[in-house]
Image (cartoon, rainbow, N blue to C red):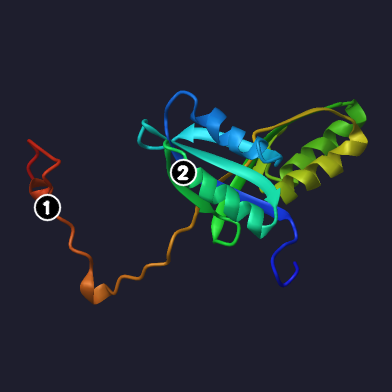
Amino acid sequence: MSMNGTEPRKHTISVLVENKFGVLSRVAGLFSARGYNIESLSVGETLDPTVSRMTLVVSGDEFVIEQVTKQLHKLIDVIKVNDLTDESHVERELMLIRVNAEPQHREEILRTADIFRAKVLEATGDEGKLEALVELLRPMGIQEVVRTGKVAISRGPKTRVRKAEAPKRPRVSEDPRVVGFAD
């Protein structure tokens, strides 16, 4: 990457949004209106059913990503935007793959699936792992590949709790949100 950060690269962007009709369209429209292709997009509810998490993978230079992030913040239904690219995070993608299971290839297909800890043939992992699996299966004849797109979660800040000072957990009866439960 150049010193001024202008070379395009893939960014994984996590966006928390209100779970409302039309939000997905507005977020996707923000990218397409600026001529940027979304390479993958996954959306799902969080623990709070009124909030969804969108995980987008988009290529762009630092300036472009910064501009799009600023525009995302302006959308009324966007709660939080986080570019996970340079943060410690875990990402996974699901891929379903159908191959020609000719008798002479079945043993090798099963071995290959086992190497990648894949079920026959369902695999999860990062993009590199899934691409490697496709390349190993390609000579046997792939009929179809279906991929979900990436989902990612930040590892969060590292926190240390000293043993001498274990965090005090509030008693259930002291929590104003809990009514009718005793310790």
Q: Position of residue 124 (x, y in %)?
A: 65, 41
Q: Which residue is mark 1?
A: 171
Asked which secondary structure carries label 2, the reply is helix
| Between 81 and 174, the one nearer to me in the picture | 81
Q: Give amino acid for label 2.
A: Lys
Q: Nearer the viewer, residue 147 or 70?
A: 70
- Residue 20 placement: quadrant: top left
Residue at the (67%, 46%) spot, across then down: 58
State left or right for residue 87 relative to residue 95.
left
Q: Specify which label sits upstream in the sequence, 1 or 2.
A: 2
What quarter of the picture does the N terminus occupy?
Answer: bottom right
Q: Nearer the viewer, mark 1 or mark 2?
A: 2
Instruction: Name the residue type under label 1.
Output: Arg
Examine the image and state in which quarter residue 130 appears: top right
Residue at mark 2:
74
- Mark 1 neighbour density, 10 Å: few (under 14) some (14–19) many (20 or more): few
